[in-house]
C-alpha cells in the first residue's frame, strides 16, 4: 500500500523556530487531520511537503521516490492552497478538460453542482463555487495523496456536507491530509489526528487529549 512519509521538517522565521523536526505519515485509505491553533504552522507543513515553501531541512518520500520539489509531486501529491488557484478568463468546462485525465472528466461534467457553472469564467464564480470546483479537481486527479488546506473556508453548509461526501467517496483510493478551522467536520471524517503545537506534532489517541493540550476549552 502506498505511503507518504515525511520526516525531519524544520522551519524558522526571523530566528523563531516554527517547526522542529516534524514527522508524519499518511497511507492510501486514510484521512489524517492536522490541527492546531491559528498561526502554529499547519499551512506551512503542507506547503513544505508539496514544495512551494522552503525549509531548513525536510525528507519526503512516497514508495521509495524522494519528493524534493513540486515537479516530483506529479501524479503523487496534489495540494489545495487557501488562496484560489483557478485561472481567470477561462471557462470552467475548459479548466476541467485541461486539468483532468479523460477517465475523470465525466465525474465533474455530470456533477449537479458543476453543470450550471460549466460555461462561466472562473472570475464570475463566488468564492464557494470556486472552492468546490478546486476540491473536485484535486480529489479526482490521478494523485495518490491530497493535501487540503482549509477546504471548508467560505463555503455554505450544503457545500460543506457535499465536500465531506466527496472526500469519503475517494478515500479508499487516496491518502488525504486535511486542516481546517472548522475542526468539528475535520475531526468527524478523520481516521487519525495529529496536533501541532510549539513546533512539534503529537499523535492524538483520544479527543479528550485536545482539551488537556488547550485546543478545546473545558466548560465546567
Image (cartoon, grey):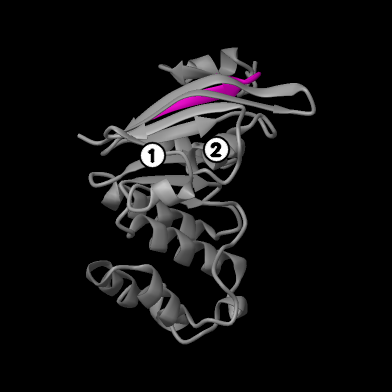
Q: Earlier in the sequence, mark 2 or mark 1?
A: 2
Outermost residue, top side: 212
- Over which residues does the magenta segment extend? 192-200
- What residue lies at 29% left-to-right and 45% top-to-bottom? 174
Q: Is residue 130 magenta?
A: no
Q: Is residue 87 left or right of residue 205?
A: right
Q: Position of residue 150 (x, y in %)?
A: 56, 47
Does the magenta stretch mainly form a helix, a strand or a loop? strand
Task: Residue at 24%, 47% (x, y): give it.
Answer: 173
- Tell me if I can see residue 191 in this picture: no
**Residue 216 occupies quadrant:** top right
Residue 153, position in %: x, y?
59, 52
| Residue identified by numbered label 2 | 48
Residue at 32 percent across and 60 percent down: it is 140
- Above or below for 53 versus 78: above
Q: Which residue is mark 1?
A: 189
For the N terminus, the image quarter is top left
Amino acid at each position: 500500500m502506498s505511503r507518504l512519509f515525511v520526516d525531519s521538517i524544520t522551519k524558522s522565521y526571523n530566528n523563531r523556530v516554527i517547526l522542529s523536526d516534524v514527522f508524519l505519515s499518511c497511507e492510501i485509505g486514510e484521512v489524517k487531520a492536522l490541527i492546531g491553533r491559528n498561526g502554529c504552522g499547519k499551512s506551512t507543513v503542507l506547503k513544505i511537503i508539496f514544495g512551494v515553501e522552503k525549509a531548513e531541512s525536510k525528507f519526503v518520500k512516497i514508495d521509495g521516490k524522494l519528493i524534493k520539489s513540486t515537479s516530483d509531486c506529479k501524479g503523487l501529491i496534489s495540494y489545495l492552497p487557501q488562496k484560489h488557484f483557478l485561472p481567470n478568463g477561462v471557462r470552467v468546462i475548459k479548466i476541467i478538460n485541461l486539468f483532468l485525465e479523460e477517465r475523470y472528466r465525466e465525474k465533474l461534467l455530470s456533477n449537479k453542482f458543476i453543470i450550471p457553472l460549466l460555461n462561466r469564467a472562473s472570475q464570475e464564480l463566488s468564492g464557494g463555487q470556486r472552492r468546490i470546483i478546486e476540491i473536485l479537481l484535486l480529489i479526482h486527479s490521478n494523485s495518490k495523496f491530497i493535501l487540503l488546506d482549509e477546504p471548508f473556508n467560505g463555503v455554505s453548509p450544503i457545500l460543506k456536507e457535499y465536500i465531506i461526501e466527496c472526500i469519503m467517496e475517494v478515500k479508499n483510493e487516496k491518502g488525504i491530509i486535511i486542516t481546517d478551522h472548522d475542526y468539528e467536520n475535520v475531526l468527524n471524517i478523520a481516521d487519525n489526528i495529529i496536533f501541532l503545537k510549539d513546533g512539534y506534532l503529537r499523535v492524538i489517541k483520544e479527543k479528550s487529549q485536545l482539551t488537556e493540550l488547550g485546543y478545546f476549552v473545558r466548560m465546567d
